[in-house]
Amino acid sequence: MEYTLVSADSHLSLPPGFFRTYLPERHRDHPWIQTIEGLQKASLKMAGMGLAQMAGRRFEDYREKDISEDDIKPAAFEPRARLEAMDQDGVDAEVLISGGAAPTGDGVDEDFQRAVLQAYNTFISEFCSTDPRRLIGPATIPLQNLELAVEELERARRLPGIRAILLEAFPQRPFWDRAYEPIWRIAEESGLPIHLHIAQPRSTTLDMSSLKPGDGTAQAFISLSPIGLMEPLSILLFSGVMHRHPGLTFIFTEAGASWLIYFRERADVVYKRHRFWTQSELTEPPSHYIDRQVMMTFIEDVPAVRLWKEVGIDNMMWSTDFPHSDSTWPESRRYVDEVFSAMPAAERHKVLAGNAVRLYGLASGAQVPVAAR
């Protein structure tokens, strides 16, 4: 098929009865499952949770909490409904961010952890196998248990529909730790790009509880979250991960793109002035690794579109963020026609489709992509 509009960051919700469907029967009544299912129901009332389901609503009608299951679009968890929503939006293919955290705590053994990890990726594999030309699945690899994470990555990368990896952006064990080397090695050998999605600002004053109206903290939280990905980018860059693994591609997802102009220059200045006394492992300026191995996804970032030469046309991918509150659905075609009108056709195609087609191996029709670069 011909790809003209690909969203490099859209979202799935876990379907109703997820654990009952995807967990072995022996695990379905585990106390952790009972707790999580209770939290899932309660979360519909919690601050910020409603914003995950606001696509297509008038801004005046957004609700950040106190939503019902009726507010969750079937397209958020059912593949045929999702394809219909994509058709309505004029989107040819989507990368679908989903998953959750690994269970930890008292009474949680490795067999149970393994079952939960496998459940996430079995679900997204089945979902994307409905139409692997259009539905792109990153395997969710929670990092609370690194041995299990590596084991699940080896399993999940062979599943149909899996074309990427999703890692948490701010793991408890920092990314400079060499314990992550097996993950980097497997991803590089597999040609699987690695997504790091925005989570929250790196702040001691702003967290998920800040998503409430009245004092400005909610808007501060939402504004700062994309720029928060500067931190893992810096760590992965200066710790030498990109240097040691030149075949890896890191996708800073929903991060925006225009700030990469400043960050690239700042990183080069830091390298020039401080590489000697810090005993830097890097043999090239940071911009070399950024240009080669970093992708940024954005929804609305007009400066990045205007300054595409400075951002780097090969470092940018557009996205819809469906069904979240930042989404351009169901007006994405109209939006990109307006905002990208001044960009030359070849460059416009790269940002809106071509870079994603290459990165995820869509043109070949292969289930597992070849190395991206």
Image (cartoon, grey):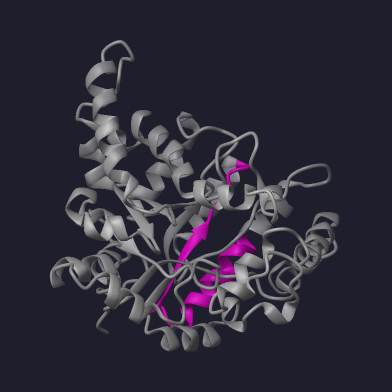
Foreground pick, 244 / 55: 55
Q: Residue at x 27, y 71 (%)?
A: 353
Q: Is residue 26 left or right of residue 209?
A: right
Q: Residue furthest top?
A: 277
Q: Quadrant of the N terminus?
A: bottom left
Whether residue 254 can be seen here = yes
* Quadrant in the rendering for residue 333: bottom left
Q: Residue at x 17, y 53 (%)?
A: 309
Q: Residue at x 79, y 62 (%)?
A: 27
Q: Is residue 233 above or below residue 39?
A: above
Q: Which residues are magenta?
A: 118-145
Q: Residue at x 18, y 67 (%)?
A: 343
Picture coordinates of residue 94 (x, y %)? 41, 73
Q: Is residue 215 magenta?
A: no
Q: Is residue 137 magenta?
A: yes
Picture coordinates of residue 319 (x, y %)? 39, 67
Q: Is residue 143 above or below residue 277?
A: below
Foreground pick, 229 / 222: 222
Foreground pick, 343 / 164: 343
* Quadrant in the rendering for residue 212: bottom right
